[in-house]
Image (spheres, rainbow, N blue to C red):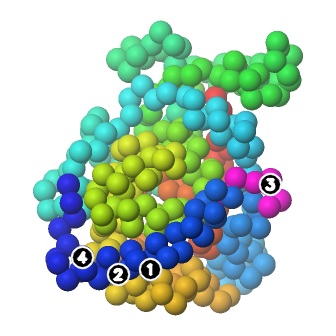
Amino acid sequence: MQSKLGWLKRTALLLLAIAARAHAHAIRVILEDDIDDSDDQNKKYASCGDCFCVTKENASCPKRPKNSFDASDDVEILKSQIALNPYTLECDPYGEEPCQMAPPQNRTLVAMGEEAVCGIRYEPRSHSTHERSPARTVEQIDGWNANANKDSTAAEGSSVSRKLQCPTYYNLVSYESFDSAKTDGAVVTHAGACGACSTTKDLAAYLEHVDLTDLGTLCVTEGLVSFERGVECFINHGLTKACAMAWVYDGYKTSDACLGVCVRSRFIHEPNNGPPPLCELNDCLRCDEDEAGPIFKIFAARTRRRSGLLSKIARPCEQIVYGIEHNLC
């Protein structure tokens, strides 16, 4: 399952790996420190001038999306929830041969891009992926959320209380719109049809790690030694196996298509964004966005922008999806 890079490129990539390993400890410190209080977390996000995103000319900065979550509370509950129909990825999405996940994605909804959404449809414990419960009404969903605020044997509002109120099992379901997901009683987890990174466990990892760029550098460096080591690195930081594989394949594609600009960016410690008001992506991130990004969005499906989450890269305001609250159930 190794990426088909030429020997010269492999050698250059190993040189890049040596440089990356030289500051790997610093990257690990950053990753371990990603979980913090809300005020500290807000300081970790990128900005463009006085705004958290890159505005169009003369446009005002929009309202900041919710991005602060209690790592010992909501995130831990998301980790404990179980997808009944997770996607598996057993092929290279960037390879010459056609690649399809199991179960197959709905290509019509995939082609809709961010107009479609991926929903978390919680199910009773007794149901399997082939025994889907009737669609729940909005009133039932609101009732669950209301019950989470009532007194129980656990402390009011505690993670134990909310965990007792929320179902553990769920199905991933792609919908053509936010409204159709809500009508079916689903909780929207990201824009775009569901894919390898759509699970709540992957969402928890995205919430824990504000800087997925450094995590990607660290784990793809491991992936240059072997594909399995790269996947294991991502799994050790909370991603599911299918999502981890999508990230490694994405890293291989970026290494193959953007080697020169990314080596330069890494060695000179180039910032993610240029100065305001344009705050343009550096050449490495721009190359990754153009060369690997479109396929990654199809197969991995979840990105921070599609999930309504900020990062250490300032993005155009219109690319950040609003209205996703990541409610537990």
Residue 311 shows in this picture: no
Which mark is first along the chain, 3 or 1? 1
Mark 4 residue element: helix
Which mark is first along the chain, 2 or 4? 4
Residue 19 - label: 1
Residue, disc 2: 15
Q: Quadrant of the C terminus?
A: top right
Q: CA distance from mark 3 to mark 4?
A: 41 Å
Mark 1 residue element: helix
Residue, disc 3: 38
**Three-letter amino acid code at disc 1?**
Ala
**Three-letter amino acid code at disc 4?**
Arg
Which mark is first along the chain, 2 or 3? 2
Front residue of this view, candidates 160 and 125: 160
Residue 204 shows in this picture: yes
Q: Quadrant of the N terminus?
A: bottom left
Q: Which residues are magenta?
A: 34-40
Q: CA distance from mark 2 to mark 1?
A: 7 Å
Q: CA distance from mark 1 to mark 3?
A: 33 Å
